[in-house]
Amino acid sequence: MPFLSRFLASLCLASLTTHAAVVRVEITERSNIPKSAYEQITGKLHFEIDPKLSGNAVIADVDLAPVNAAGKLSFVADLRLWKPKDDSRSNGAAWVEIPNRGGKSSLPASMMAQGFTMLNVGWEFDVAADKLRLEVPKARNKDGSPIRGVVSAVFTPDKRLDEQTLTDLTDYSPVDIEGANSRLIVRDRAAFSGGQEVPRKHWSLQNGRIRLEGGFEPGKTYEVFYLAEGPPVAGLGYAAIRDAVAWLKHDRTSLAKVKHAYAFGSSQCGRFLRDFVYLGFNTDEQDRMALDGVMAHVAGAGRLVLNQRWSTPRSVSGYYTASYPFADTAQKDLVSGHAEGILANARVKHAPKIFYTNMAAEYWGAGRVAALTHTTPDGAKDIELPENVRSYFFAGTSHGPAPFPPTSQVKGSPLANPVSANASILALRLAMHRWVNEGIEPPASVHPKLSDGTLTPVAEVRFPKVPGMAAPNAVKAGGRVRNPQLADGAGDGTELPLLVPQVDADGNDLGGIRMPDIAVPLGTATGWVFRPAEFGSPKDFYLLRGAWVPFAKTKSQSEAMNDPRPSLEERYASKDAYLAKVKAVVLKLVEQRLMAESDLESQLKQAAARWDWVMRPSAP
């Protein structure tokens, strides 16, 4: 047998230490990563956990899952690892990239140059087989009979549709679809409960696709319910990440040289990490710190609704992400009477160092309510963050940057927002590593505050009359999500306070980190935009999107459009003058450790392209 085959076989059959949750490592492929000194290892991690341990007992339905003769519960996760081929080039730190809906991550070249390892582990049961997936058992009643219950999914079409695929419910086949549990509700607004029930005879469901007589109307929000069978023990996804990290850092069969591990999770995965910490999963089965650092990116105040029966983690959950507690420290909740925090509850033994990085969309986006991570639950007062936590707000940014040149969703609607904070996010990754590894304090938190007027109730935002943009003062945040860890749900359904950044005279956010596009603006950039009239519900925000409205080129054009914002010719004497201001902003961000020196050239190149585009002859 060739050496490599013997090596792989030995790992596949490796029996790990008695207390370890990873009991077998199955490697399916090793390959070189092109143009790098790295290799990729793919395979599976086989887990066994004791459902009676206190750190595992928090998993919903863990006591109803099948166990082996040793009383252990088994599950399997897809594994993907990037590491230096030469262990001597490793810096001893790993980024655990939480897969967003099973997606595969990569390491930027700059991080590979520094010797970081990257770990992807499947944590989600409801993604396709070609994604990074977690295979989990299904819960059953104590007598062995199948568990049945009602599942639901929400969707809002942008155009009239005859049928809609229920992607959120792919893993839940209907049982007795003609029964009384099968219902379809339609609502005029996404953020509100209630609605009207559609008569059962007018809709049908087959092969995961729902059809409605006359079609689904654009802008209406529909929620479908039906009876399903066999709930997966979804909360094992948290245990998979916890135990994979423990294996990577401590086990003799670890495939990489790793001392410290930091997790990065974006959007859905940022909410995953907030719940991971809240539920106590950052303590492994041997009472050690799992993740040394956590970066919860664009999560707002949300947590993932994963650890409950009939969960649908792949759902976008636009208005349904935030449940009490919102902040890390214990804050008295006037609605429910509870007083706890993400880090301040009995389950949390090992608190990692934490960065929260939020865009404007997470403050403005209904249901994300990022301000509640640094205010009291009622939004009345600022609060202090713990010493191990930093919060960074990036002004004038959407959930993710739009490509440049930007386009409109439909003719006449605002351009998509291209403002990007990616350079700063990368710089903060290095700051996290240095904080954990060297004890070097990261940049101070930067976020809007009630005390200095940079944070305000949405009704009090002084947004100017920007052409093509309606005033946002009447929008609502939606309601709280039920917290399954608190018996009374902690006020689920209660309307959330919507606090957002105050804006300057141009409509650009105050109180945050200003990227060059905002500090030296060519237009107004927002983390929100209303739905186009053609999409229906034009008084609702289009979820997770932002807008960019360039300034007029000349004063006469500005006056002709009744645009209160000064024109480009009034702001900048020339392109060179504009670029000089951009350079000064970038150098300041470098000084603050919010960009790298190597970013200067690319930022100036980007700014020059922006200028040329807004000043092109065909521009308004």
Image: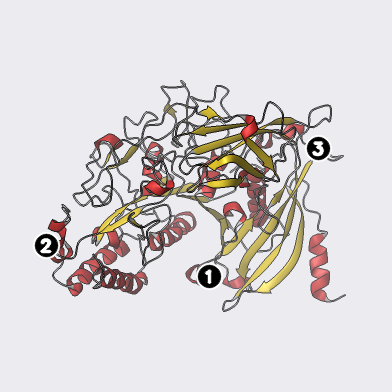
Residue 348 appears in the rendering: no
Tell whether label 2 touches label 3 (CB within 8 Å): no
Q: Which residue carries the number 3 mark? A: 66
Q: Amino acid at mark 2?
A: Ser
Residue 97 pos. (x, y %): 56, 56
Q: SS class of the residue under badge 1?
A: helix
Query: Where is 380 relative to 27, above or below?
Result: above
Query: Disc 1 and disc 2: Cα gap in Å?
Result: 51 Å
Q: SS class of the residue under badge 2?
A: helix
Query: What's the mark number on residue 556?
Result: 2
How many residues crowd mark 1 within 10 Å: few (<14), some (14–19), many (20+)? many
Residue 41 pos. (x, y %): 68, 66
Say left or right for 385 vs 109. left
Say left or right for 93 vs 411. right
Nearer to us in this view, 301 or 196: 196
Numbered disc in front, either 1 or 3: 3
Numbered disc in front, either 3 or 2: 2
Nearer to us in this view, 566 or 596: 566
Q: Which residue carries the number 1 mark? A: 112
How many residues crowd mark 3 within 10 Å: few (<14), some (14–19), many (20+)? some
Residue 450 pos. (x, y %): 27, 37
Numbered disc in front, either 1 or 2: 2
Q: Quadrant of the N terminus?
A: bottom right
